[in-house]
Image (cartoon, rainbow, N blue to C red):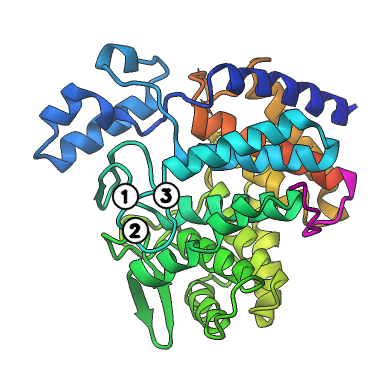
Amino acid sequence: MLQEKVNSCLDQISSYIESCDYAGYDPYDVMESPFIKRVGANSKWIRITATQLNRRSPINFRPLLGIPKGHNPKGIGLFLWGYAKLFTIKKERKYLDRIYYLLEKLKQMKSRGYSGNCWGYNFDWQSRTFLRPKWTPTIVNTSFIGHALLDTYEFTGISTALDMAVPVKDFILGDLNRIKKGDAFCFSYTPLDTDAVHNANLLGASILARLTRYCPDVCLKDTVLKSMDYSMQCQHDDGSWFYADTNIQGWKDSFHTGFNLQAIRYIMDSGIGLEYKAAYNKGVEYYAKNFFLKDGTSKYYHDRVYPIDIHSPAQAIVFFCREGSQYKKMTEKVINWMLDKMYSGKYFYFRKGRFLTNRIPYMRWSQAWAFHALTEYVLAETGLKLNKIESIE
């Protein structure tokens, strides 16, 4: 039975992540190497090359490069989210202890010097477009952590989680740049750039939408809608989106499409942007028809299968287990495929190629996302109502 298979996996993965104290390597942590930091100090292309070689290698050279294992804020947020769901289901004290522990971790890892609460990465990160120094807050990290905090509060009533979530709006509204298109605008990825990335923009709008329940700001809903308008105007006729509005980021991939749709669903569930329901449905249809094979394989790109990234099945599970009974069989196929092909019996793999599987057990990228996905599925299967606040304090 699938439920038993998932619960057994959750027991094993919980033991693994707890034995590691939630710390580990990351696909993008190469700049933590003193050697790479030195040789790449003045060259974007050396930093990009080192990042891509380190990320793509199935052999873990990090110990040789002097890269330490670390706590990643986004990973900690996803683990918190998972434990909040498990506590909601089982009401066991051990999950509550983990929640308090991870809340404290998130407090310690907040990015300093910005408005409100926000989080970045625990390493310098060179993307195709920009160098983001360690702890530079991103709208993606901050939004996912914000959602985890709100669910933690709504599932447990722990007021600390709500107190940490509400100031997220101050960072998004006060510190991020806005790329304008008529009356609409796109939130920037970080305070340092003007990249127009759709999943980032919609995720930011989605956490603001949920915060309208707790914040009296009458302008907040209008801000959410204008941000949503930008990315909805960029949706293609077939329901898809490019990753971003740049000449070098015009690809369509699985998990970012899932992020877009999950964010839109959060926004509409908050009573905002309901005029985009038909466009949302078209996006869901495109996602389901273009990124999955009949056996549950989750493709990375819309037009090719490999490499298969753990994010692709994980986000598919998170999204489709909440999208209705018509996707139940598909969700179960994706789960079975992920457990059969991307799981060692102890931890989850990073990527699977046509001929080779990268089995490096990344903590944030692989374990946190799989944990989040499987706990989301288990909670959805219980049929428990969301947003039911029962304080345990």
Mark 1 sits on what residue?
Answer: 136
Residue located 65% across and 21% down the image: 343
Residue located 57% across and 55% down the image: 259
Residue 32 shows in this picture: yes
Q: Position of residue 110 (x, y in %)?
A: 41, 47
Q: Residues within 10 Å of mark 3 (few under 14, many from 20)?
A: many
Mark 3 sits on what residue?
Answer: 119
Residue 369 shows in this picture: no
Please tell me in which quadrant of the rendered image residue 282 appears: bottom right
- The amino acid pointed to by label 3 is Trp
Q: Position of residue 212 (x, y in %)?
A: 62, 74
Q: Secondary structure at mark 2?
A: loop
Label located before the other in sequence (3 or 1) = 3
Q: Secondary structure at mark 1?
A: loop
Q: Residues within 10 Å of mark 2 (few under 14, many from 20)?
A: many
Q: Residues within 10 Å of mark 1 (few under 14, many from 20)?
A: many
Q: Which residues are magenta?
A: 382-393
State how many labels appear.
3
Q: Position of residue 268 (x, y in %)?
A: 68, 72
Membership of 160 in magenta stretch: no
Classify residue 4 as left or right of residue 293. Answer: right
Give the vertical position of 302 relative to 15 (above or below).
below
Mark 2 sits on what residue?
Answer: 190
- The amino acid pointed to by label 2 is Thr
Q: Secondary structure at mark 3?
A: loop
Q: CA distance from mark 3 to mark 1?
A: 7 Å
Q: Residue lying at the far front in this picture: please name it.
A: 393
Q: Nearer the viewer, mark 1 or mark 2?
A: 1
Q: Residue lying at the far left in this picture: please name it.
A: 42
Q: Main secondary structure of the magenta part?
A: loop
